[in-house]
Image (tube, rainbow, N blue to C red):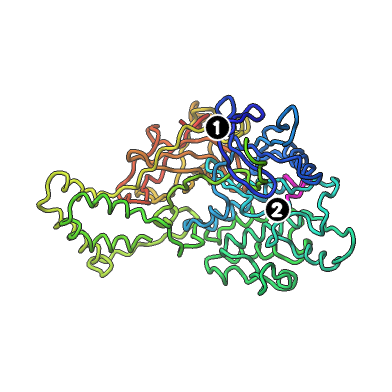
Amino acid sequence: MGTRIGGDVVEGVLGRGGFAIVYRVRSPEGRLFALKLLPLDVGPERAERAWRELSLGMLLRHANLGRQVAAGQWPEDEPRFVWLKLELIEGPTLDEWGRDPGRTVGEVVDRVLEVVRGLAVMHEARVVHRDVKEANILVHLSTGQAVLVDFGVGYHEGDPTLTKGMFPPGTLPYRAPEAWAYGRAHAGEPGAHYRAGPGDDLYAVGVVLYRLLTGRFPFRPAEHGGEDVEAVLHQTPLPPHLVNPNVPRAVEEVCLRLLAKTPEARYPGAVALYEALEALRARTDVVWTAPLHPERRPAVKPRARGWKRLAVVGVGLAVALGAWWLGSVQEVAPGGPTPEPVRAVAAPPAEAPPPPAAAPPLALRKDSAPVKQQQTSGSQSEAPSKHRAAAVRTACLGLTGAALQACLGTQQQVPPERPAPPPQACPIGAVETMTNTLGLSIGEKTSVEWSDVRGRSVHVHEGTPVYVGGAWEAGADHTGKGYKIALPDQTRISGRLYVKEGRVYGRLTEARTPLGVTYPVCLELTDTDGNVGLELQPGSEPGKMMVDPVVRVRVVDRFP
């Protein structure tokens, strides 16, 4: 490593695959990017495809599409590669993201909607992606949004055909029925070549959605292996709600329509699909906060670390608390060779953040039915917890010093702290959108809410959004007299929450109005006194943050 390409220094390999190598590079200013190196000496088709990807990247600009920053040839004196400098998207692939047991119906539909938004921009530019799949969709850690990447096999209307065979490059389980039908009808015909269109991309979106909802492909492999073409052509996929009873019928209808046998039976285009998903997301008869796969369990149980801490107290205390802890745990739900071609624009982070101990429910909203908690004194449900509490108190008696402190610490549980995120720039275009489009000023604040039920703390987790209660009037925070509505009532503001030193902090990066209009924003959480972060309320425990129902957000131009 240490080679300089296009002015940037190569620091490591992000991935290898079929057409290129992707490196992590650092610019002279210290910023990290992904650099895709495509060889030119592998035949005219591969070389032409490298130049095509370069031209497509320069044509497409959107928050939900991988952004190309620069391009060139390397080495400059005798070029053997085309290099594409890309935005480094740090985050998991969509299938990795979807395996989290806390993913809700609403989150899954939001990610698919974001992919479709990017496809709408591509199709409007007369570009077909031709390889839409979870591995080519990254969920950006800083914005939480899905980003469609890798235009290496994309096709721009009017460009010459590069593929010599029947089908363009792609991934078989995502190939549309009309492509298979064309292949059968023209088998053995010289020069026959299927040309994919927008309908092929939409069918692939249907496969992606089906997999997120059910954890499996719409069609099982054939007996001999490979794709069951007969099923793809003539059978209807098993309805998702039969595979996963947690799938709402309204979401299922969209998914099955996307998997229709002909493009005409799907949606007229990506824009129509986007509008259908927005209308679906606005429905109040769907429980959007319900987890899709509540039966999944995180690979690591957070309390295991607490158990190791208890070991220092001594063998006697371990025996006394052993039964109690077991019960608790059970309840926790380029030098060198020529680069090999690669497909991924950015690899997932080296170490994914630890998943929550269980999928916590979202805070109560106006459109959710209140749940009454049963309070039965002396009931059987309370008995085990009382016995465990008594056991802990008994075990603690007589202990002094470090042993007593460690023992008492087991009763005062608070959400586990993760390292605070480093200073971070706002999402691309957020400051301009807030100041020019919405009319907000840096430092301006407004009240937002997790619940319209006052007087009691609410339960939130890392991804719980807040809502604008009443319209946010731009300028009202400074002048007391607003001059325009920046964001309407019930605008959903989402981002990421984290705990640090007993306080909850939030970096909010997207505002979504009730009509589905989204804006990139840069807002931080404050308490009602203007202090950054929120005080944890009683009832907080590992994986569970209890906070006041009403807080404030402040406009910033950077996350400190």
Up the image or down, 223 lies above or below 9; here it is below
Q: Residue at x 18, y 46 (%)?
A: 405
Find the residue positioned furthest to the left: 398
Task: Measure the C-alpha gap from mark 1 to mark 2.
Answer: 43 Å
Up the image or down, 184 lies above or below 30; here it is below
On the image, the x and y values in percent for residue 275 come to 68, 52
Q: In which quarter of the image is residue 198?
A: bottom right
| Residue where numbered disc 2 is placed | 131
Question: Magenta region: which residues?
Answer: 121-129
Find numbered disc 1 in the image and state the secondary structure of the residue it sits on: strand
Check residue 474 in the rendering and tell me which mark sits there, or answer none.
Answer: 1
Q: Residue at x 84, y 58 (%)?
A: 193
Q: Is residue 494 left or right of residue 211?
A: left
Q: Is residue 32 left or right of residue 273?
A: left
On the image, the x and y values in percent for residue 140 come to 56, 44
Question: Does the magenta-highlighted stretch encompass residue 144?
Answer: no
Q: How many marks?
A: 2
On the image, the x and y values in percent for residue 43 come to 79, 45
